[in-house]
Image (cartoon, coloured by chain):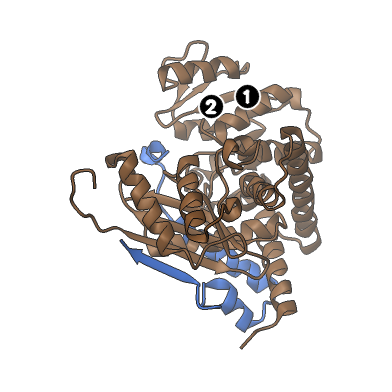
Chain colours: A blue, B brown
Amino acid sequence: MQALVDDTRVMREENPFESMMSRFDHAAQLLKLDPDLYKVLRVPKPRNNHLHSGFHG
Amino acid sequence: MDNGHIEVYTGYRVQHNFARGPAKGGIRYAPDVTLDEVRALAAWMTWKCAVVNIPFGGAKGGIICDPAQMSKGELEKLTRRYTAELIDFIGPERDVPAPDMNTNEQTMAWIMDTYSMHARHTVTAVVTGKPVDLSGSKGRIEATGRGLLIVVEEAVKKLGLKPSNTRVVVQGSGNVGGVAAKLMHQTGYKVIALSDIYGGIHNPNGLDIPDVMAYLEKHRTLEKYPNAEAVSNMDLLELDCEVLLPAATENQITSQNANKIKCRILAEGANGPTTAAADDILERKGVFVIPDILANAGGVTCSYFEWVQDRMGYFWKEDVVNERLKDIMVESFNDVVKYAETHGVNNRIAAYMLAIDRVAYVTRLRGIYA
C-alpha cells in the first residue's frame, strides 16, 4: 500500500532503514556491546563465503 | 520474454547473520529494489527472529523488475533463473526464503520445484509460504494478523483495559490489518476505523467488520461504505482510541503527527511505521508501543512452523499452529516488557537489546572460526 503517504503532513523525515539502524546503535550502546562484535552484527560480512550474492540473468 | 526477446534483470540475496540458525527472509520483486534496502531488511529479519527466539538468522532478497508488466510465464522464468543462480546459497539448513512484496505462494512453489530439480529430490523446506497443498502450513496467511491480536491482548491485560470497552483503529485492510481487524472484532473489541489505500472509514460506535470486509471484497475500495464517515488515512491515525494498529506502510507516525496520536497502545503491524524522531514523542506521551519486530513477527513464526513441519513430514492442525503461535508471541511479549522494565528503557529499545543480546550470546558461544 504505497499511496498512504500522499498527505502533506507526512514528511519522509527519515528512511525507515536508517531508523532501524539508529535503534540498533542505541541498543548496542546500552548493552555495551564489544566493538568487534558490534561491527560483525551491524553489517553483513562474508562468513562461509556466502554472505551476499547478486545475479544478472 | 514472451515476445522472444532476452531481458537482463538484477537480483540480490543478502544473508545478514547465521549465528542462531539458517538465514530467513522474504524475496521481493519491485522496480525500486536496491542492495542497500535489501541489506537493511536482512538485518531487520535477524532481529525479528531473535526477538521471538526462533532458530533463524536474517536474510532478504529482491529482483529489480516490474511484475505488473510481466506475464505469469515471464515471472516463472525469472523466478527459476534467480533460484538456479542462488542454488548453492539457499537450502533448509542455509537460507530459507519466503514471500514478500509482489511475491506469493506460487513464487515459492516455483522456487521449491527449481531447487528440488537440482537436488534430484523434493526439498519442501527450502522455502516457506508455500501453498498448503504443497507442504505449506495451515494458519500461515492469518499468522501476522493473529500475532498482532495476541500481543495486543497481552498489552490490554497489562494496562487493565476491557476488550468490550477498547476502541481499535486499524490503518490497512490487507493480510495484516484486515485479518487483525477481523480477529479483534471476533474477540469482542470495538473496531471503530479501518482504511485501505484510498482512505478510511470511521464509526465511533464500532464497525461491523464482516460487513465491511464483504463490501471491500465486492467494491475493491472502502469509499462510500454506508454506516460510517469517510476519514483520510492520516486523520485516522489521530482518532480517539485505545489501540492503534498501523498495518499498512512505513513512516506514518512522524515528528509531525506523533503529538496528535491519542491511543494508549500502538501495535505496529507494518514494518517501520514510526520514525525514530516520533519514538521520543510517543514515549513522553506514555504510549505503550509494541514495536514492529515483535508485533508483526507472527508471520515469520508461522514460517518457522512450516519449516519444522516440512522437515518432520508431519503437518499440524490449524488450532495446533495457532496455539503454538500464541505460546511464542505471549512469551516474546513478556520477555520484551520484562527487559524494558529491568533496564529502564522503552519497549522498542528493549526489543532490540533483547535481540542483539541473544545473537551476541550465541556468537560468543560459537566463537570465531578464523
In the image, is B369 to the left or to the right of B156? Answer: left
Q: Which of the numbered marks, if any, corresponds to residue B191? A: 1
In terms of depth relative to the viewer, which is nearer, A18 or B142?
Answer: B142
Task: Establish if B235 lies above or below B58.
Answer: above
Residue drawn at point x = 46 percent, y = 29 percent: B196
Quick one: which residue is furthest to the front in this view?
Answer: B120
Q: Are there few (<14), some (14-19), or many (20+) residues within 10 Å of tag 2? A: many
Instruction: Kindly report the distance in space between the C-alpha atoms of the residues bearing marks 1 and 2.
Output: 8 Å
Give the percent coordinates (x, y) of residue B347. 69, 54
Q: Position of residue B270 (x, y in %)?
A: 54, 44
Q: Give the camera-side residue of B97 and B274.
A: B97
**Residue A14 located left or right of residue B278:** left
Q: Position of residue A40 (x, y in %)?
A: 58, 77
The spot of residue A32 in percent (x, y) is: 69, 77
Quadrant occupied by the C terminus of chain B: bottom right
Residue at 58% over, 48% down: B128
> Helix, strand, or loop for circle 1?
strand
In the rendering, which numbered label is found on residue B194?
A: 2
Q: Residue at x 68, y 40 (%)?
A: B147
Q: Are marks 1 and 2 in contact (CB under 8 Å)?
A: yes
Chain letter of the residue carrying label 1: B
In this rendered view, identify the residue nearer to me: B117 or B12.
B117
Residue B333 visible, this angle: yes
> Badge 2 sits on which subunit?
B
Q: Amino acid at mark 2?
A: Leu
Is B204 rendered above or below residue B140? above
Kindly give the residue lying farthest to the bottom in the view shown. B370
Q: Amino acid at mark 1?
A: Val
Tell me the element at label 2.
strand
